[in-house]
Amino acid sequence: MFNYNFRWGQALNSLPQMLEGALVTMEIAILSMAVGIVVAIVLTVFRLSGRRLLAAVATTWVEIARNTPALFQIYMVHFGLGSFGIHLSPYLSLLIGITFNNAGYLAENFRGALKAIPDTQARAARSLGMSAGQAFGSVVMPQMLRISFLPMTNQMVWAILMTSLGAVVAMNTDLYGVTSELNARTFRTFEFFAMAAVIFYLITKVITLTARLLAARLFRY
């Protein structure tokens, strides 16, 4: 028989703590995306370098990131490295794990974007006296990032949701971690996790809508 008594007051009183956790969640997601984009560009360059070793490193990274669970990647960073005496904080382990995953997916997105750019773009830049590096950095890469803009938005949303996997490494300062601790103290599971779900939803919707507005404004032509 359904006789559960909702107590939203407790959850609402804890909203400031949950919002603080949401800020940590956003911080991890933004940092992981920023570093992930840089690493993904490097991996993309490696794959185009023509050097087998560099291409093999990039391909291995992408294959592991895309074909193993993100939970496994975070777990290996924290506990796997710990087996070799490298002990990282839950925050750093979560950040590195999500960054690793982001870089792999973004590198593949960038590779696909490069295929959509005609080779004549780079050749035209070279004909103007640019080096291969200058042609890539000034002509090809801006177009690559433009084509990849919306996929990068999707990856940002995924990064926010992945922060909840920090539970496996005892991360307790992000939104999911704070919610779990509040639930453990009050046993108001439905109220707290329902509010956390709403906060996650609002964050991701704001990011998605902002990205669409930016894309409409920046890429009108």
Image (tube, rainbow, N blue to C red):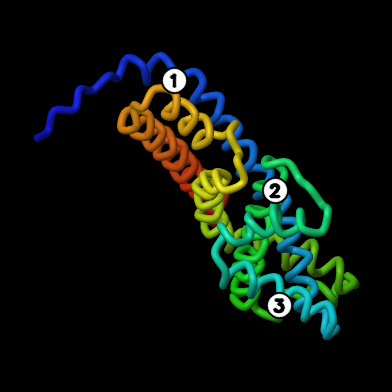
Q: Within 10 Å of the Cα at label 1, are there few (<14), some (14-19), or many (20+) other Cα atoms?
A: some
* Callouts 3 and 1 close, C-beta under 8 Å: no
Q: Earlier in the sequence, mark 3 or mark 1?
A: 1
Q: What residue is shown with label 2? A: 93
Residue 154, how many percent across, how many down? 50, 55
Residue 123 visible in rendering: no
Circles 2 and 3, Cβ within 8 Å, touching? The answer is: no
**Could you tell me how far apart the alpha carbons at marks 3 and 1 are, in whole angstroms?**
43 Å
Question: Which of the marked residues, 2 or 1, is nearer the chain's N terminus?
Answer: 1
> Which numbered disc, 2 or 3, marks the residue that appears first in the sequence?
3
- Give the crowd class for mark 2: few <14, some 14-19, many >=20 residues within 10 Å: many
- Residue 211 in view here: yes
Residue 117 picture location, percent across and down: 64, 74
Residue 14 vertical position relative to residue 44 in the rendered view, above or below: above
Q: Which mark is residue 132?
A: none
Name the amino acid type tagged 3: Thr
Q: Amino acid at mark 1?
A: Leu
If the image is split into quadrants, where does the N terminus sit? top left
Q: Nearer the viewer, mark 3 or mark 1?
A: 1
Tag on residue 59?
3
Mark 2 vs mark 3: in front? 2
Mark 3 crowdedness (10 Å alpha carbons): few <14, some 14-19, many ≥20: some
Q: Is residue 189 above or below residue 99?
A: above
From the viewer's side, name the closer residue of 32 and 48: 32
Determine whether the residue tagged by mark 3 lies in a helix, strand or loop.
helix
The structure residue drawn at horizontal position 82% and vertical position 52%, both measured from the top left corner, is 86
Residue labelled with disc 1: 15
Residue drawn at the location 78% of the way across and 65% of the way down: 42
- The percent coordinates of residue 98 (x first, y second) are 63, 53
Mark 1 secondary-structure assignment: helix
The local secondary structure at tag 2 comes to helix
